[in-house]
Image: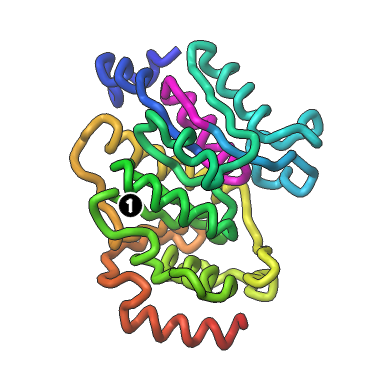
Amino acid sequence: MYSRNRGLIDEVEQQLLATRCIAIPGLGGVGGIHTATFARLGIGRFHLADLDLFEEANFNRQFGASVDTVGRAKVEVMAEWVAKINPESEVVSFPEGIHAGNIDAFLDGVDLVVDGLDFFALDARRLLFREAAERGIYVITAGPIGFSCAMLVFDPRGTTFDDYFDIHDGQEVFDQRLRFALGLTPRATQLAYMDLGHVDLRSGKGPSLALATDLCAGMAATEAIRILLKRGRPPCAPRYFQFDPYCRIYKKGVMPWGNRNPIQRAKLWYLRRKLG
């Protein structure tokens, strides 16, 4: 099944991937295509979590969404897809999503977490990143922003999620979401073409395209290969990346102190006035 991986992944590495376990919380826009991409790479074990059902509004961007899956649990549909791609793979499903009561089981025996949570699910995301760091697990987050992919890799020994985004308990939900968006895209290439009138951080709505989720899967899986096969240390936060094929540009850099950086603070002030 994986003979065409040869030349990029050797036989020993392929056997190693078959023993690895990837946890993907959230199986919608990015989570679904992440799951399919890793199954085609030959990952042998998955922990998949999602509490939602597929609906027609998912058709424009979610891998598992189709006429046949409307009303079905996303975790069930994606577990079936993994089995169709690789019948030898193992899937542990968490149909209640992730929460404090099951995070231990979700991360048990996991080699890597690939964040597929909804952009606005910050409580679950903060829990995930904190618990993964305590267990020494890398986390990759790749967000479909406009026509682009914005990606961060978090080293469990390095900068934490809360420190990078400057998010903490007691902040308003709107402020947390704004900080997440700002930290994910420090160079904000999407502002050249995105209509911000369709972005509502308070209600939790924004545009998203399948072409961007596909891009996220490719970028996240590439970094996953680097981590799982120990091909050198990955570039981690506060390093950031955004590839925007619409603008035909690739932005990368280091943001010392994350959103506490003076430049980021100025952007935060401006965007709070513009979007608030």
Q: How many marks can you see?
A: 1
What residue would you read off at disc 1?
Answer: 154
Image point (40%, 67%), residue name: 165
Q: Is residue 179 above or below residue 232?
A: below
Q: Is residue 111 above or below residue 159?
A: above
Q: Point out the residue furthest to the left here.
A: 232
**In the drawing, does residue 268 fall left or right of residue 229?**
right
**In the drawing, does residue 81 fall left or right of residue 116?**
right
Q: Nearer the viewer, residue 61 or 27?
A: 27
**In the drawing, does residue 274 fall left or right of residue 227?**
right
Quadrant of the image for the N terminus?
A: top left
Q: Nearer the viewer, residue 168 or 100?
A: 100
Image point (72%, 34%), residue name: 73
Query: Residue 151, how many percent across, how many down?
Result: 41, 54
SS under mark 1: strand
Query: Residue 125, how many percent across, how many down?
Result: 49, 54
Residue type at the position of mark 1: Phe
Q: Dot 1, crowdedness within 10 Å: few (<14), some or many (≥20)?
A: many
Give residue 233's quadrant in the image.
top left
Quadrant of the image for the C terminus?
A: bottom right
Q: Does 105 appear in magenta?
A: no
Query: Residue 261, how many percent across, how many down?
Result: 31, 78
| Residue stretch rendered in magenta on the structure | 25-47
Q: Is residue 4 above or below residue 173?
A: above
Query: Residue 135, how many percent across, how many down?
Result: 32, 41
